[in-house]
Image (spheres, coloured by chain):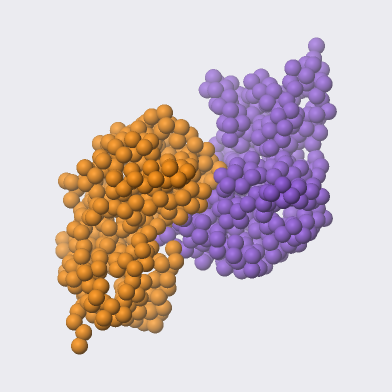
Chain colours: A orange, B purple
Amino acid sequence: MSATLAADAALEARRRAGQRVLAMTSGEIGLPVLPELRERLAAAAGENAYGPVAGSAALREAAAGYWSRRGLATDPGLVVAGPGSKALLYALLLAAGGDVVVPVPGWVSYAAQARLAGGQPLPVPILPGQGGVPDPARLRETVLAARAAGRDPRAVVVTVPDNPTGTVAPAATVRRLAAVARDLDLFVISDEIYGDLVHDPARPAVSPAVYAPERTVVTTGLTKNLAVGGWRTGVARLPDSPAGRELRDTLLSVASQIWSSPPAPVQSAAAYAFAEPPEITERIAASRRLHATVARAAAARFTGAGAHLAPVTATCYLYPDFEPLRARLAAAHGITDGAGLVRFLVERHGVGVLPASAFGEPDGALRVRAATSRLYGDTDERRTTALTSPDPLALPWIQEALDHLGAALADLTGPRP
Amino acid sequence: MSATLAADAALEARRRAGQRVLAMTSGEIGLPVLPELRERLAAAAGENAYGPVAGSAALREAAAGYWSRRGLATDPGLVVAGPGSKALLYALLLAAGGDVVVPVPGWVSYAAQARLAGGQPLPVPILPGQGGVPDPARLRETVLAARAAGRDPRAVVVTVPDNPTGTVAPAATVRRLAAVARDLDLFVISDEIYGDLVHDPARPAVSPAVYAPERTVVTTGLTKNLAVGGWRTGVARLPDSPAGRELRDTLLSVASQIWSSPPAPVQSAAAYAFAEPPEITERIAASRRLHATVARAAAARFTGAGAHLAPVTATCYLYPDFEPLRARLAAAHGITDGAGLVRFLVERHGVGVLPASAFGEPDGALRVRAATSRLYGDTDERRTTALTSPDPLALPWIQEALDHLGAALADLTGPRP
C-alpha cells in the first residue's frame, strides 16, 4: 500500500496548500449510490442476525442468477458471500493452500495475500495488451520449475477484465490458460470484479470458468459496477466438481473462523442488486459509458504525449508506458524510473498516479497506472450530472481535469527550451 | 463449528416435526435492534466510500471514549475497527505471529484462528470458577516448556468476562496473569466483548490492560451488548508502547490486505453507539438485567438437578458440570461423555446445548454450555416485552422455557423407576 499512500499524502499536502490536484491514484469509484439501492440498505437496517456463513439464501440465489444470465449456470449452493471480494480472495488462497501464480503487472493484493496465507507468489508476465492473464506458456514453465524446486503451486489468479491495464484478455488466451491449469492441476481463481465494465457490452470478457469449469472459482462484487466499495459486498462462485465442493467446504470453514458472515443489511441490499432490476441495469450501463468515455479521452492525452498504450477496452484504468521516451525523460528531468515519473507528476502538477512497481513490475519500469474513477465531480450533484450526460467530456469540470492532465504530460514529455 | 451445527441440525429436525425445542446452543442475542440505532444505520445508507483501513475518525474517537469512560484512557490513533471483533482477533494473531496460549475451556475460534494464522494453540486450563483467564502458574510452565521445545509463543488470549463459563476472573488473577505475560514478553489479547454484561455493574470486570498496558490489546464490539451480531462491528485498542504501535502498523497492513475497511454505514451507526447516549446506556442496562435474571433462573434449574455450577456473574452463559452425577448418568442412561449428554437432551427433550469438547475440553468431560440468549421470545414484540418487563420470569414464554429445561433435567438426573 505504501506507493498509494505516498502518492495520496503528496496529493493531500498539495490540496491543503490550496493547489489543484488530479486524483488518479485510487480505483475507488467516485459516484453516488443509486437511490433505490440506498433505500434497500436502509430498509434492512433492522436485520441483526448472523445468518448462514455462506450468506443468505436470497443473496446466493440472486448471485447465481447474475452468473446464469452471463452464460455460467450456477448452483446457489456453490455461491459463498463475504465482506468484500478481497476477503473472499484471501480466504480462497488460504483454503487452497500452497503457492499462487499471479499475473504481472497485477493487483498488488494478490501477492500480499498469498504471503499472508503462508504461500509464495509466483509472478508470471502477461502477453502484450492482454492484461490480467499470465502468459500460458510461461505459466507452464514457472509451475514446472517451481515444482522441480520443491515448491507447491496450487492456484493461478487471473483478472478478467484487468486492473491495472484496462484491457481484456482474448478468449483464445483464456482458453490456453485454462488448458494449462487443467494439465497442471491448478485452481484458477478468476477475479471478475470489473466484469460489467467492458466498454462494448456486445463483446463481454470470457471467463476461464467457460473452459475449465471444474477448477475455476469466479469472484465479483458491487464495488466497481455500483460504486459501493465501502459497503463490502463480495460473492464467489465455486466449481461444480468434487474438488470444487471440497474447496467450498474449506472456504466456509475459514470464513466461519475469520468473519462469521457478511453484514446482514448489506446482504439484503446486495441480493436486490444482483437480481438486476431495470434501474440497476441502467445505472451499470450509465457508469460503463462514463468510464469508457473519460478513460478513452484520458488515454488519448497519454498517447498524444508520446506514451505507448494498448487500446483501453474496459474499466477506468490506463497503464501508459513511457519507455519510448526514456532518453528524453532522463535528459530533460532526470527521470529514470517509475518513482521519478510519479514524483514529477505529483510534485510539479498535482497529478497523482501509481508507479508500475506497485503492480509487481521492476522499479525501473517507466509505466504508471492512472484511474479516471475520481474525476467525475467533487459533489454528488456533479457526479450525477456526469452519469446522465450524453457528452460528459463537455462538462467543464471533466474538461478541466483532462486539460490538467494534458498540461502535465506536455510539460513531462514536450520539448524543453 | 461441527458441534454447534450438529446440535442445531437436530433441533431444526425436531422443530420441523412440530416438536418443542429449546435453543440454548448459540450465544447469538435474540433481541431486536434499538430503533434509534437502526435509524442511524438507515441514515448512513448513502455512505459508499472505503474510508481509512483503521475505520472512520468518528468511530475511533467514539470507541476511545467508550474505553476512557471505563478507566482505560485511549488514543483514537491506537484504535482499529474491523468487520467484527472475530476478524480483528484473527488479524491480531496473524500480526503477532508465533504460537498462542488459549484458555481451556475457551471459545473454540481462538484455537482455530491460531492454526489458520500458521501458529499452534497452547491450551492452559483456567482456575476453578475463574473462566477465560489461563491459570498464571500453568501459563508460565506451558510457555517455558514450549520455548524449550522450540516453539514460539508470543501471545496469550483471555476472555473477560468469560464465554463459556459466565464467570469473571477476579482482579488478583488478572494481575498475576499480566505479570507473567510481562515476564515472558507475551502480548495479552483480551477479548472483552462481554464487558457490558457483568450482572452487577458496580463490580465491573478488570481488564489486563490495567496491569500490563504496554502489551495488552483489548477487543470488543456491539454484538453482545446491543444484539447486532449480524452487522459485524468490532474495535481493537492497541497498547500505547513501541511494541503496541508496531503491532498496530502490522495489523493495519494485514487488515488492508484482507478486508480493506469495515462497512461504512455500519461504522457510522457504531460511532453513535460507542458514544453511549442515554438511550444506548438504558438499552444495554435492560439487556444486562434480562440476561442476569434468566441466566440465574436457568442456573438454579441446573444446580437443582444436581449439577455443579460456579456462580454466574456475567453474560448469558452457563457451564454446568455433571461430574458429581457421573455414576447415575451412566447407570440410568448410558451417558459417559459430553456428546452423550448433549444427545440425550436434544433427542429426548429438544433442549440444545453444546458439549464441553466444543470449548477445548476432553470428550469425556460431563459439562455443557447453555446460553439463555435465545429464550426471550420468538417475536420482536415478545422480546421487547421481555426487555422492559420488571419481572421477565413471570412472562409465560420465559416461564415455559425454564419449565421445559427443568423437566428435561429432572428426566436426566432424577431417580429412575
Q: Give coordinates of residue A297: x percent, y percent.
A: 19, 65
Q: Residue at x 81, y 17 (%)?
A: B415
Residue visible at 42% across and 32% down? A243
In the picture, measured across the screen, residue A286 lies left or right of residue B134, that is left
Q: Using the rendered view, name the quadrant where residue B178 is placed.
A: bottom right
Across the whole image, how many numbered discs are drawn on residues? 0
Q: Is residue B408 visible?
A: yes
Question: Looking at the image, which residue is at 26% across and 41% down?
Answer: A176
Q: Compare residues B184 and A11 and report the one nearer the observer.
A: B184
From this viewpoint, is residue A270 visible? no
Residue A332 in picture, x, y percent from top left: 26, 82
Q: Name the quadrant of the N terminus of chain A.
A: bottom left
**Depth check: B64 or B340 in front?**
B340
Give the position of the C terminus of chain A as an image quadrant.
bottom left
Left or right: B42, with A207 as reference point: right
Residue A50 in the image, given as x and y percentages of width and height? 52, 42
Q: Which quarter of the picture shows residue B265?
A: bottom left
Residue at the outermost top position:
B417
Could you tell me which residue is drawn at 64 percent across and 40 percent down?
B108
- Please identify the residue farthest to the front as the structure is shown: A148
| Left/right of residue A212 with respect to residue B204 in the rendered view | left
Observer-nearest of B132 and A180: A180
Percent x, y of residue B103: 72, 45
